[in-house]
Image (tube, grey):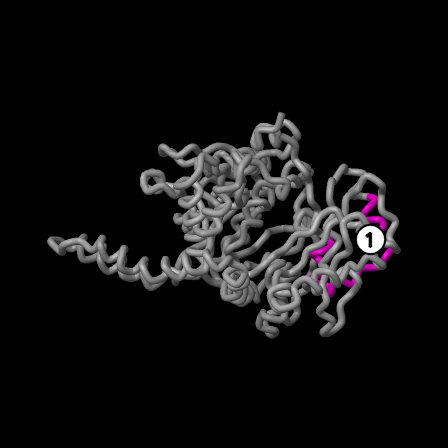
């Protein structure tokens, strides 16, 4: 088994600049990808939609590709939205002929088709469509058969939550189940490596695969998790009910669960810089890292208002325009890589962000800003609390903990390094060739 690497930086990164990359920049990028032996580069989208301004990588036409200096060993790909085809059902053939030349005349080797869940339903076969309708109609009645005779308070709680489950079930889960059924019928598939947060979508898919095939499912939880997100943990009961994956690959030793599920270490290229980072003397800035939750970010910015020399980096999934403008007044904003910011940090402050754990693993002192109402989404564990990290709920607490952590760091640098090493060793796996080959069972 060989591993093929697809890089989609230009296509995915184009959301930030409307895919308007210069030819020289693209050429330099292609050379870099070739130098590190990437197999495929997804240059951008292929599209007929000309509304609004978009750069060349939004269309990635053959004529545009011809302007590029493409290394001979590099294979090129594009992505197309399924809606481009689905919205032209009566002339799909002509639409495809406008988008693509025959493979013998095309510079492309790979075309990826992506669809939203509602588009996925639109692309179902007639047989699958009717089966989907049958599932939607039958599911409530089949579930009601599980109603318990109310002989105790536990029975009452069970029944209430069972009824809530019926109302929360969506068409996307049924569609995912059908998708799994169809995948299970394809010959020569013996393994599936799938990103996993173990939500309803994945449970439905897993159930279909395990019910109708011998395909092994490897659930890849290659991310920093939070203790509050207990639903991502695969339990023994999930195996009993038939929708657990065969193996769960996690980001570090701390995430391995002590039960009968086969939990093993995974590996993620995303956290490679944790192992490359060289610790330096701490700087003088307060580095503030935003969350993917807008409410948490707005609360965070409110709490840090009394701090000086603040540099704010928002979460890449959240556009800065969605943050309350007055909270950013007088605060420097940046798009720098977090690993370039850590050396400048006296303290790193954040909320509901896995980057806080990365900061601790790199030896930075961290303060988690939380709200007393609701779940506390803190990726750190108790080890090192009050020494390298702490948690606050108000501006006053922040100032107190800020001073305490700086004093501890000044007097206990060796212990700070020991704690940082513990987090690095227990929450991450270095993405070496050996580790990657072991995780993905490559020869």
Question: Who is closer to the viewer here, 212 or 168?
Answer: 212
In which quadrant will I find the C terminus?
top right
| In the image, residue 328 lies in the stretch drawn in magenta | no
Q: Nearer the viewer, residue 128 or 227?
A: 128
- The majority secondary structure of the magenta stretch comes to helix
Rendered residue at 64%/61% (across/down):
81
The reply, left or right, for residue 269 in relation to residue 154 is right
What residue lies at 86% left-to-right and 57% top-to-bottom? 23
Residue at the spot x=78%, y=59% of the render? Answer: 60
Where is residue 342 shown, x and y percent of the image? 66, 48
- Residue 107 visible in image: yes
Name the image quarter holding the N terminus. Answer: top right
Residue that protrudes farthest toward the top in the picture = 443
Q: In the rendered image of this protein, does residue 309 appear above or below residue 53?
A: above
Q: What residue is rendered at 48% in x and 32% in y?
A: 264
Residue ranking furthest to the left:
151
Q: Which residues are magenta?
A: 10-31
Name the residue that disc number 1 marks. Answer: 26
Q: Residue 281: horizontal and vertical position, in percent?
A: 68, 42
Q: Is residue 419 visible?
A: no
Please provide percent x and percent y for residue 140.
Answer: 29, 60
Say above or below: 49 vs 317: below
Check residue 28 for magenta coloring: yes
Residue 200 locus on image (x, y percent): 41, 52
Between 40 and 385, the one nearer to me in the picture: 40
Q: Is residue 60 above or below residue 338?
A: below
């Amino acid at each position: 088994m060989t591993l093929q690497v697809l890089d989609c930086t230009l296509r995915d990164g184009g959301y930030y600049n409307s895919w308007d990359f210069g030819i020289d920049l693209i050429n330099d990028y292609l050379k870099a990808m070739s130098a590190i032996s990437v197999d495929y580069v997804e240059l951008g989208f292929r599209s007929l939609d000309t509304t609004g301004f978009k750069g060349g990588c939004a269309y990635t036409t053959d004529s545009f590709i011809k302007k590029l200096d493409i290394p001979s060993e590099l294979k090129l790909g594009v992505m197309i939205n399924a809606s481009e085809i689905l919205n032209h059902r009566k002339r799909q053939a002509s639409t495809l002929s406008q988008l693509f030349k025959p493979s013998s005349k095309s510079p492309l080797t790979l075309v990826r088709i992506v669809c939203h869940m509602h588009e996925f339903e639109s692309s179902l076969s007639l047989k699958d469509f009717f089966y989907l309708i049958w599932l939607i109609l039958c599911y409530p009645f089949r579930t009601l058969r599980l109603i318990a005779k109310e002989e105790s308070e536990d029975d009452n709680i069970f029944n209430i939550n069972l009824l809530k489950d019926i109302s929360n079930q969506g068409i996307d889960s049924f569609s995912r189940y059908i998708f799994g059924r169809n995948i299970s019928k394809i010959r020569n598939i013996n393994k599936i490596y799938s990103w996993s947060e173990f939500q309803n979508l994945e449970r439905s898919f897993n159930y279909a695969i395990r019910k109708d095939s011998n395909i092994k499912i490897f659930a890849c939880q290659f991310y920093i998790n939070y203790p509050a997100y207990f639903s991502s943990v695969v339990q023994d009961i999930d195996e009993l009910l038939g929708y657990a994956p065969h193996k769960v690959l996690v980001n570090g030793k701390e995430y391995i669960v002590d039960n009968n599920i086969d939990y093993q270490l995974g590996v993620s290229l995303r956290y490679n810089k944790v192992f490359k980072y060289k610790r330096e003397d701490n700087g003088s800035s307060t580095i503030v890292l935003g969350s993917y939750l807008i409410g948490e970010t707005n609360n965070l910015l409110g709490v840090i208002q009394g701090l000086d020399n603040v540099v704010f980096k928002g979460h890449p999934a959240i556009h800065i325009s969605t943050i309350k403008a007055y909270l950013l007044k007088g605060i420097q904003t940046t798009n720098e890589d977090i690993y370039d910011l850590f050396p400048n940090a006296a303290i790193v402050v954040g909320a509901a962000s896995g980057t806080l754990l990365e900061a601790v693993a790199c030896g930075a002192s961290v303060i988690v800003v939380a709200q007393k109402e609701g779940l506390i989404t803190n990726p750190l564990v108790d080890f090192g609390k009050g020494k390298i990290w702490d948690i606050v709920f108000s501006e006053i607490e922040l100032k107190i903990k800020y001073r305490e952590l700086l004093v501890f760091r000044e007097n206990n640098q060796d212990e700070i390094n020991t704690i940082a090493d513990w987090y690095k060793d227990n929450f991450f796996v270095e993405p070496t060739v050996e580790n990657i080959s072991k995780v993905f069972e490559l020869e």
